[in-house]
Image (cartoon, rainbow, N blue to C red):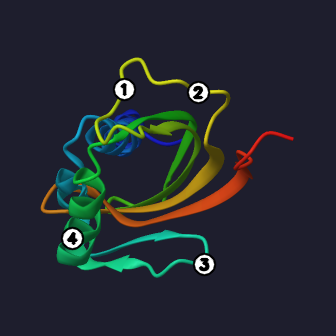
Amino acid sequence: MPETSDMFEIMVAERSCERLVYRYAWLVDSGEAVGIADLFTLDGVWAAGDGEPMRNREGIRAGFAARQAIVRRQSRHVMTNVLIDVHSADEASGRAYLVNYRHDSDSGVAERPAPSDAPKYVGEYHLTFRRVDGEWLFATLDLDLAFIRRRSPR
């Protein structure tokens, strides 16, 4: 069994990484998506499926600036089942489930409340974390989709 001080450091690392996951979701949903880049290491990578990954902070910032510019979109990233494994004082990995509700308004401005028949998609984030200068950051974030809403009802 680890020493009490080691257990405390593990718990702090787990909680710090978990908060990154929740902060990420809040930033994208609150219209402040460009701030997501600051949650990554300088050489961080954001990837989703077969699409081209966003690499390094500036690439991630540019990608999320484009997302932030979509003012017709209302979204909520519901993060759950967050599981963090601390491997060392400066490295950890994790998983988190994502349920994403999203609606794009035809009027060009996000509707509140927005209509939704079901989640837009459900997936799982595969995460790696690195502690840099005492701060936990994403090194990689890779989204694997499990379910996606049909484009038109049957």
Q: Amino acid at mark 2?
A: Ser
Quadrant containing the C terminus in the rendered view: top right
Can you tell which mark lies on residue 50?
A: 3
Identify the image quadrant of residue 106.
top left
Dot 4 or dot 1, earlier in sequence: 4
What residue sits 53% from the left and 77% below the top? 51
Identify the image quadrant of residue 89.
bottom left
CB within 8 Å, label 3 to label 2: no
Q: Is residue 55 above or below residue 33?
A: below
Of residue 136 and residue 60, the one placed in the foreground of this image is 60
Dot 2 or dot 4, earlier in sequence: 4
Identify the image quadrant of residue 120.
top right
What residue sits 47% from the left and 71% below the top? 47
| Image location (x, y in percent) of residue 152 | 74, 45
Dot 3 or dot 4, earlier in sequence: 3
Q: Residue furthest front?
A: 107
Of residue 94 and residue 47, the one placed in the foreground of this image is 47
- The residue wearing badge 2 is 116
Tell which tag, 4 or 1, sits nearer the viewer: 1
- The residue wearing badge 1 is 111
| Image location (x, y in percent) of residue 10 | 40, 43
CB within 8 Å, label 2 to label 4: no
Of residue 30 and residue 3, the one placed in the foreground of this image is 30
Q: Is residue 83 left or right of residue 56?
A: right
